[in-house]
Image (tube, helix red, strand yellow):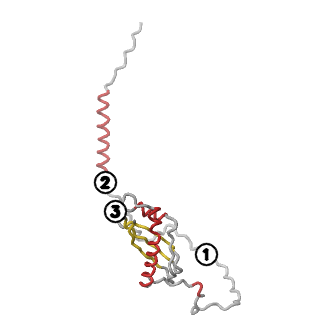
Amino acid sequence: MSKPAPAPQRRSRGKLFVAIPVIAGALLLAYAASRWTADPPPSVAPPSEPSVARQEPPAAPVELPAPPAEPPATAPRPTVAETPPAAEQEPPPQAAPPPEVVARATEEAKAQLENLRPQMVSRCPPAGINSGGVQLVFHFTFDSQGRQTARSVRPRHRARGREIATCLREMDGLELSIQPPGTNVAVAVPMALP
């Protein structure tokens, strides 16, 4: 009878786990040493002599077609001294309105706001406000015909009056108009509610 084949021997895995990191570390050290001790790459210097190896022949000149002849002028061309028509000129920037116009517009806006006070308090009651009321500043912009073009309402103190200022900004019927000032004018009118 034949003898059974001997069982293969198992190799120790512990040696394998030690050998792999040692080999990897040795390769890493060899690579780093070669990088640090290697000569730097040669710098690229501009060539001192032109390369004679390959020169291309100069290109043949290309003839361009002649420009078309100018058509005869039927109307004289404008000269530099002429000015463009007045419709194309941009209007000069508006100067600030005179102080008396601003004062008159402020007084008219203040009088109209006082007339609207009951309507403002009834639609936007200052709920939760102490007896001191709410200090607001109304900002209006009027065009040269006296029509309101912009309105803003802000509380004088940020903590108080935000809700009522928002309500008044969104309120209909607060459009003011003043006597035509002849120029755009912006005014600020302080007011305490209620």
In the rendered view, tell whether residue 127 sits above or below residue 74. above
Q: What numbered label is drawn on residue 60?
A: 1
- Assign a secondary structure to mark 3: loop
Please tell me whether residue 13 is drawn above or below residue 35 in the rendered image.
above
Disc 2 marks a residue whose amino acid type is: Ala
* Secondary element at tag 2: loop
Disc 3 marks a residue whose amino acid type is: Ser
Figure check: 78 above or below 6: below
Asked if labels 2 and 1 touch by Cβ distance under 8 angstroms, the answer is no
| Among the two numbered marks 3 and 2 on one chain, the one whose residue lies closer to the N terminus | 2
Query: Which label is found at residue 92?
Result: none
Q: Earlier in the sequence, mark 1 or mark 2?
A: 2
Q: Amino acid at mark 1?
A: Ala
> Tag on residue 131?
3
Q: x, y percentage for residue 149?
A: 51, 73
Image position, residue 31 (x, y; %):
32, 47
Rendered residue at 43%/67% (across/down): 153
Query: Does label 1 or label 3 sit earlier along the sequence?
Result: 1
Q: Residues within 10 Å of mark 3 (few under 14, many from 20)?
A: few
Q: Nearer the viewer, mark 3 or mark 2?
A: 3
Q: How many marks?
A: 3
Badge 2 crowding class, 10 Å Cα cut-off, few under 14, some 14 to 19, many 20 or more, is few
Q: In the picture, residue 9 is in which quadrant?
A: top left
Residue plotted at (45% across, 67% down): 118
Say which element carries label 1.
Answer: loop
Position of residue 189 measured from the top left corner of the image (x, y, whole percent): 41, 73
The N terminus is located in which quarter?
A: top left
Residue, disc 2: 38
Viewer-nearest residue: 122 or 185: 122
Name the residue furthest top. Answer: 1
> Label 1, label 3: how many angstroms apart (C-alpha)?
96 Å
Q: Position of residue 91 (x, y in %)?
A: 53, 84
